[in-house]
């Protein structure tokens, strides 16, 4: 092999198959067990919804007693046998009383009820139940294909599938319940039953999906909900369209909200949208002047109820399904959080180090299109494991004896590596979201603890030191944000060793650290591209230049006996250089700030 090929082999990342992470198997396709669980969730959800959506009109024969008032859900014609074997044709108007509670069913009423059952299904029989259930399974299959195409990671997360199923069932249950209650109220107040269709809180489910998962899922979810609710309003295609518009606006209104009170603003937007959509529907029907105000009020009422439902249920779903919304992440940044407060008092150097990494990670995440808020939270908590042994980390040592001086390099490396495991345990004890815990667990990957590895080689020059014994246990970063925190951690630590942190030196340092981590094969599972790495390096350089900015020496600010920065000619401010060349300081300052050429 020639020299060119040898150099290329050295630069290529090591084979991941031979360097598998020690505590996690390699990522594979969705297992059959997970697919079976997803299928069972879809089947169970379809059967539950089929039961909820079945028509509730009882099938009654002539002469039977009606258990309750039965009204026509829509207008239709039907035929029934009359006297002398004649066939009579009749029309039933929407809302017309067909059979009165406690009275016997007539021939005409029995045929009308039979016609309703024929149109809506078998009125609760097994045929209608399983037929509608299988139809919903086909609909869910299309939704699953969309998820698999745009959110493939979700197909392997059974908990998220359960959450989607719960939100879907919850939306239909709430809508059906409100429809039943408001219909009774409309009958009591002698209002038009059609007004009730505008007051259902169908937008609550879409708003929750957008808050807890993402907006793309909201699109598919809203489509499924509007079709399911269309089953409740047979013969009228406009209410499903009304629900779809309101749901999409609800999902858009809560993207990246930073305060829980912002849900109220989203509710106002949905209310305005519902009112506008209701006005358009009434205008289409030619009923805007006769019932428009009632329908507009019903639309605003539905948005208000949906907002109340979301405000109450979001903390519940965050806790039960381990979801980290932006609102939850902002709460974790509060300095009064127990873990952060303990980090401030027990490991102040680590806390300051985490704050700087938070600035680096946030800027890098924003540059590559990831969630900057999650990056900052992950950076703040990535080193919380150092709380248990703060004195063993250099940033927390204050002119005292270094405890590692009395330990062997192997023992020191074990103590250093243990802060990752301790951090994961603390995150579990304080119930941090799993997405933050994963960043804590992956922020060092399987990288080498270089200092103690080199120290071991110096102390034991004749022995073959096992490099694997001086590596972190991993796993390597599985997400872009975990990799960003790893890169920010290494770049920030290395930047502290720069004696003269000029912009050029900082840029070279950031590029070299990122290149070293890439060649160590720590980024192969994070999906970061070379373009992403370039943007990350650029953002790191910008932030570090702001941290290590130059300042002039102010008169009277020097500490007696200490060398001033201005004594070093390489660090003089342009004003000081001009003054040293014989110019008047005031004239030199004016010349330095004058944009005109000299």
Image: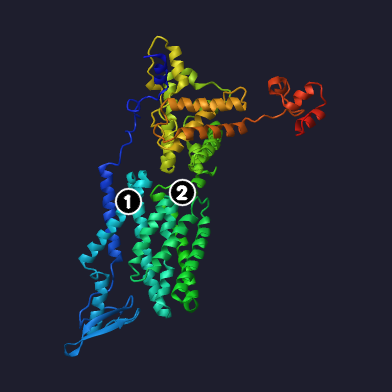
Residue 588 in the image: state x and y as whole percent. 79, 28
Q: Which mark is residue 239?
A: none
Could you tell me which residue is drawn at 49 percent across and 28 percent down? 514
Q: With 2 as the anchor, is 335 left or right in this view?
A: right
* SS for callout 2: loop
Residue 357 in the image: state x and y as whole percent. 53, 34
Residue closest to the eye, 281 or 57: 281
Q: Which mark is residue 325?
A: 2
Residue 170 in the image: state x and y as whole percent. 36, 60
Q: Is residue 256 above or below residue 447?
A: below
The answer to which of marks 2 and 1 sits earlier in the sequence is: 1
Question: Tag 2: Cα neighbours inside 10 Å, few (<14), some, or many (≥20)?
Answer: many
Q: Nearer the viewer, mark 2 or mark 1?
A: 1
Q: CA distance from mark 2 to mark 1?
A: 23 Å
Q: Decide if residue 255 is in sight here.
A: yes
Could you tell me which residue is drawn at 24 percent across and 64 percent down? 129
Residue closest to the eye, 267 or 76: 76
Residue linked to disc 1: 144
Picture quadrant of residue 425: top left
Residue closest to the eye, 465 or 503: 503
* SS for callout 1: helix
Q: Quadrant of the C terminus?
A: top right
Q: Residue furthest bottom?
A: 84
Q: Is residue 146 above or below residue 269?
A: above
Instruction: Describe the colour scheme in one phrase.
Output: rainbow
Residue 477 in the image: state x and y as whole percent. 41, 34
């Amino acid at each position: 092999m020639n020299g060119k090929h040898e150099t290329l082999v050295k630069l290529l990342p090591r084979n991941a198959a031979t360097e598998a992470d020690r505590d996690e198997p390699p990522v594979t396709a969705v297992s059959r067990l997970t697919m079976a669980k997803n299928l069972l969730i879809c089947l169970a959800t379809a059967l539950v919804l089929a039961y909820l959506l079945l028509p509730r009109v009882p099938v009654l024969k002539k002469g039977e007693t009606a258990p309750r008032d039965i009204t026509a859900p829509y207008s239709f014609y039907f035929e029934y046998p009359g006297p002398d074997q004649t066939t009579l044709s009749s029309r039933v108007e929407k809302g017309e009383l067909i059979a009165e509670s406690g009275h016997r069913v007539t021939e005409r009423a029995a045929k009308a009820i039979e016609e309703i059952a024929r149109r809506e299904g078998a009125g609760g029989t097994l045929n209608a139940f399983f037929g509608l259930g299988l139809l919903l399974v086909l609909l869910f299959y299309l939704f699953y294909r969309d998820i698999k195409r745009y959110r493939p990671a979700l197909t392997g997360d059974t908990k998220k599938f359960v959450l989607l199923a719960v939100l879907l069932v919850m939306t239909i249950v709430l809508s059906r319940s409100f429809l039943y209650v408001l219909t009774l109220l409309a009958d009591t107040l002698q209002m038009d039953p059609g007004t009730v269709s505008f007051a259902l809180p169908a937008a609550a489910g879409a708003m929750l999906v957008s808050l807890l998962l993402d907006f793309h899922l909201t699109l598919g979810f809203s489509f499924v909900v509007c079709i399911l609710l269309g089953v409740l309003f047979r013969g009228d295609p406009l209410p499903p369209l009304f629900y779809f518009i309101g749901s999409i606006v609800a999902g858009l209104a809560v993207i990246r909200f930073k305060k829980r009170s912002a849900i109220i603003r989203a509710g106002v937007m949905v209310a305005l949208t519902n009112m506008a959509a209701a006005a358009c529907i009434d205008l289409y029907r030619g009923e805007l002047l006769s019932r428009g105000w009632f329908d507009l009020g019903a639309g605003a009422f539905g948005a208000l109820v949906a907002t109340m439902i979301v405000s109450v249920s979001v903390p519940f779903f965050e806790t039960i399904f381990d979801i980290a919304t932006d609102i939850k992440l902002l709460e974790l940044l509060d300095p009064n959080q127990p873990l952060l407060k303990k980090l401030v008092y027990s490991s102040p150097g680590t806390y300051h180090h985490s704050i700087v990494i938070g600035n680096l990670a946030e800027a890098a995440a924003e540059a590559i299109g990831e969630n900057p808020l999650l990056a900052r939270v992950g950076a703040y908590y990535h080193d919380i494991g150092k709380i248990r042994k703060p004195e063993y980390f250099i940033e927390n040592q204050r002119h005292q004896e270094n405890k590692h001086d009395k330990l062997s390099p192997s023992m020191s490396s074990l103590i250093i590596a243990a802060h990752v495991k301790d951090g994961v345990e603390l995150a579990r004890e304080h119930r941090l979201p799993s997405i933050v815990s994963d960043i804590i667990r992956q922020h060092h990957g399987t990288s080498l603890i270089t200092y103690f590895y080199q120290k071991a080689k110096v102390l034991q020059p004749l022995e073959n030191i096992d490099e694997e014994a001086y590596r972190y246990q991993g796993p390597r970063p599985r997400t872009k944000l975990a990799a960003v925190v790893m890169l920010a951690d290494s770049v920030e630590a290395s930047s502290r060793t720069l004696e003269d942190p000029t912009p050029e030196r900082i840029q070279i340092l950031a590029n070299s650290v990122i290149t070293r981590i890439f060649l160590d094969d720590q980024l192969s599972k994070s999906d970061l591209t070379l373009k992403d790495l370039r943007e990350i390096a650029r953002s790191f350089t910008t932030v570090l230049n702001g941290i290590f900015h130059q300042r002039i020496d102010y008169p009277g600010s020097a500490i007696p006996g200490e060398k001033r920065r201005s004594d070093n000619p390489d660090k003089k401010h342009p004003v000081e250089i001009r003054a040293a060349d014989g110019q008047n300081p005031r004239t030199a300052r004016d010349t330095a700030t004058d944009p005109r050429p000299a």
